[in-house]
Amino acid sequence: MIPERLRSNLKREFDRSLLAKLGLVLLVGVLLMAVFAPIIATHDPTRTGYVDENGNEYPPRGAEYTTQIGEDGEFVEVEVEPNEEHLLGTNNIGQDVFSRFVYGARTSLLVGLLGTGLAVLMGVPFGLIAGYYGGRVDDVMMRIADVMLAFPSLVLALALIGVFGTSGIGVPDPIVMAGLADGMPESTAIPGTVTIVVALVTWVWFARVARGEAMSVRTEEYVKAARSIGASDWTILRRHVLPNSLTPVIVLATIQVAAVVLLESSLSFLGFSGTTLSWGYEIQRGQDYLRTRWWIATIPGIGIVLSVIAVNLLGDWLRDALDPNIEGERG
Amino acid sequence: MTTPDDILRVRDLSTRFFTQEGQINAVSELDVRIERGEVFGIVGESGSGKSVTARSIMDLVESPGRITDGEIWFDDAELADAVGDDYPDAVDGTLVNLLELPERVRDSLRGTAFSMIFQDPESSFNPTLTVGEQLAEAVEVQRRASANPRSTRARTREYSLASYALSTVLPSRKYVTPESRERAIELLELVGIPDPVKRADEYPHEYSGGMLQRAMIAQALAGEPDVLIADEPTTALDVTIQAQILDLLDDLQAETGMTILLITHNLGVIARMCDRVGVMYAGEIVERGTLADVFDDHVHPYTEGLLGSIPDLEGARGRLEPIPGNVPSLLDEEMADRCRFADRCPKAMEDCLEHPPEYPAAGSDHHEARCVLAETTYDETRALSEDHFGETERPAADKHAGPEEPDEEPPEEQSHPPTETTGGEHQ
Amino acid sequence: MALGKFLVKRLLQGVFVVWGVVTVMFTLRAVSPGDPANLIVGEAADPHLREQVREQYGLNEPIYVQYADYLQGIVVGDFGYSFQSGRQVEAMVIERVPATLELAIAATIIAILIAVPLGVISASRRNEPADYGATMFSLLGISTPNFWLGLMLILLLAVQLGLFPTGRRPVGLAEALTALATTGYATGLVVWLKHIILPAITLGTYFTALITRLTRSGMLDELGKPYVDATEAKGLPAALIRYKHVLRNTMIPIVTVLGLQLGTLIGGAVITETVFSWPGLGDRLIQALNARDWPLMQGIIVFIGISFVLINIVVDALYASLDPRVIDE
């Protein structure tokens, strides 16, 4: 599917770019972490308990911790500094920060990949049709795109969430189902609304790129020739225009995954997420404890930075090797 | 080694490109002697190293290319005087070896000692500044240089970021002065651009190709250079415009008496313009001499091939017929120590397996050829077999005509490896 | 003349875009679940009162009448009334503009002052340590979520080192300047400055990184163009070539990219303001969102849309005046 020339370009760029290799290692790391989260995590990330079934195992004896007693006599805040049991400490309600860090990769990558995929499915056909037909059709469609661009993506996403709310779709966790991990949540929540919303606010960049490609292909001789022998518009779009726009779309999609991961983290930081197992959400939680428990907000941020760097490095590699001319926006 | 009326003498010049694929010998041990006031032509196929030669003289060779060896002696008493104390090795009488001078001194010769006309006028002007402004800059270079000749040594240091920053705020500190703008308009008029006052305020994209090439000639003349290097000055132009541009160059040369180094793949242009000519092949000059020597008494089979089918020598339409075989690889590792043309030569003999020196040839004193045929006659019994160089096609007599490939210089191309970055925006 | 025509065309397109933004927002509001009256008077309110409120806010009109009314209001600058506070939306928007503007401008200044020189150095010392440093910096900058960066800055510089204050700023630029003019004391200005530095860095880092990248790659592209050789051949001083020719041509397209990135700047401002309790539009937008205060939310977003359109027209005009080829195309 990939032409030989492109493949050799990809390989050459990869061989000479240390950063591309770093990006690949990072990305594989984050992906493994996301997929095998139940195995890697040391604790159930959703478990808030200070007191376990036996009554006194959390926090482990000797660990430095603070507790507060709520009005009805329950412990409502338990914070534990990093120790042997809790590698990165616990958050304000006693959840294991390391385990939540591991699971957070799932949310980021799921939203990043699904949201971008959805945006490609929306934006590319839109752009191809606008660019291929040109004229009035193009005018109207591009004005619609202009309207979309006038909304900052985060702001539009917030407005859309204001309408549709946030919801998560619970999906059974295959690793746990396969019996590879004990004591972990049996299902993972995909933040459905957020995924759709990020696609709704980013598809327009794909439309612009696809349109540009379609416009340049439209005037090529072989397209004219195909038309002259009676090929239908649909056939031409599918056989000639779409394949030509693939390269820039792939590169843009890579970069957009990074943008969507950032957008998702921003939304969950603001409290709009379909799941609490999200890096952004965790940072927001840690915001109030900066003075005393700095790790709660710090650790998840490192996760975001590393995954976004990984995707950006891969995007740079693809862009250098494939050399399309594109633009996009961060959320 | 010097003749009094030589303005430029290039000796043993080697320019190489150090690419990922290996070392490319774009120009190898090249000797050229150019007399003051003459028009010297260099002709050759794409990738023969003629443009690299020009750029080497201008010091415009870019990384990963580098002049690795040789001397470029330039006759300029004033310069010799100015640099004699600091760089005694670089000076011999009134001659100065430019390659012995530091970069900043060499740079200071651009525009005033040497200037250059490029192949494609449309991409050789900055698209966002008016033509008048760009001409005025060239005038300004000359104006500042002549105001203080000795300062040529440090001229490039004079202007810094601070100067530019200041000039964006204070109009009086602008690099280009009103006088230079006046002069730019005169220059436009000189090269035959109608309504120069108005045209000076127009941008390059508002000019036609021919007009823009005239403007580029005007720009090259602004510094009143001693040597004008014209690198394919007519290649990018329409046929009818080509003749006009050549006429213009001819007139200007007659008027100013400047020396012109004309680089072209077009023998018609050579015949029309030059006094003497050198034929370049694979980074070296294979035959040189007066027009008569090269056109009528040529020795080298490559020259023969070049002349093979020129439809009309007088017009500017002469096009090279492709010579059978591939353009030779200039990769160091692939270059054998033999006549570089042997694998395409219809008259290759056993003698050709040794790299030939330049032999004097019949005709004028200037006539030399890098070919054993200057000394001996072709002897079929010693001819190399057809498949001596593997699969390379080497047909003898019948040649097929066809248009030449667009003129590109492969070593040049390789001098810009794919950059690590591209334009466009991220995220 | 040509520029005028170009601007008129862009202005007409801009009007269309603003209309589109208004319509999208109105549609979102119309399809959003829940009775707005509940948001104003509460679900348990007396039906009479509720009916009164519906009447007052025009919620009983058919939807197309509400739409027409809203559009008409926008044209004359009437954005309706906030559900929550009952105040005029336009007033609630306008009073928050200066803080956001101060923040955005400060961030932009920081970004340009750092990024352009960094990009130039990076491009002119390609593959040297300075270039690698700048590349790593810009990679980190575009990959760091600004809310986290803000928290880390607070943690390190404000909490640990105590260099900067935390909490909401007590004084805006206008007040600080008024105080300076009337009393002659600059203390207010200093307080303002101390409060704006961290948010401005937070918001500006992404742009610094982005502009550094764009400048570097744009300059490398530009340096490879034939006109640069021609300019060198003329004998122009290197600094003149680098700045007047190459950098200038590099920055022209970057300006338009930044115009399009204005959305990112505003989105970033929303988050930054939340982190630093900065009393700007973004802060108010989040409040409105949490309270489901649709008129206010709508007003803020439409205002942002109008600003986006206007600024991009200015950017286009700037582009056209810098690169003469644009209009002729």
Image: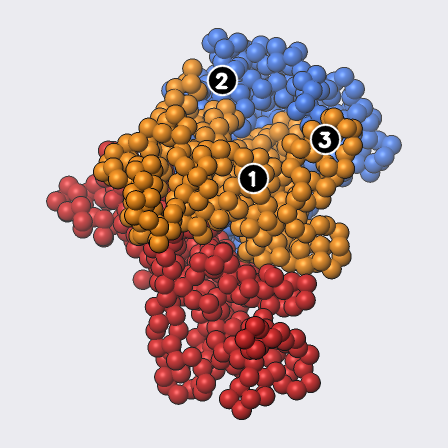
Chain colours: A red, B blue, C orange
> Which amino acid, mark 2?
Glu
Determine the CA span between mark 3 and mark 1.
Answer: 21 Å
Picture coordinates of residue A213, whole percent (x, y): 33, 45
> Which amino acid, mark 3?
Ala
Picture coordinates of residue B122, whole percent (x, y): 47, 28
Chain where mark 3 sits: C
Residue B170 badge: none
Residue positioned 39% across, 25% down in the render = C76
Chain where mark 2 sits: B
Label 2 sits on a secondary structure element that is: loop
Determine the CA span between mark 3 and mark 2.
Answer: 51 Å
Q: Indicate whether A159 appears above or below C326.
A: below
* Residue nearer the viewer, B74 or B204: B204
* Residue nearer the viewer, C240 or A53: A53
Query: Which of the two discs, 3 and 1, sits closer to the camera?
Result: 3
Badges 1 and 2, same chain: no
Label 3 sits on a secondary structure element that is: helix
Residue positioned 36% across, 80% down in the render = A174
Q: Give the labeled residue for mark 2.
A: B202
Label 1 sits on a secondary structure element that is: helix
Chain where mark 1 sits: C
Q: Give the labeled residue for mark 3.
A: C179
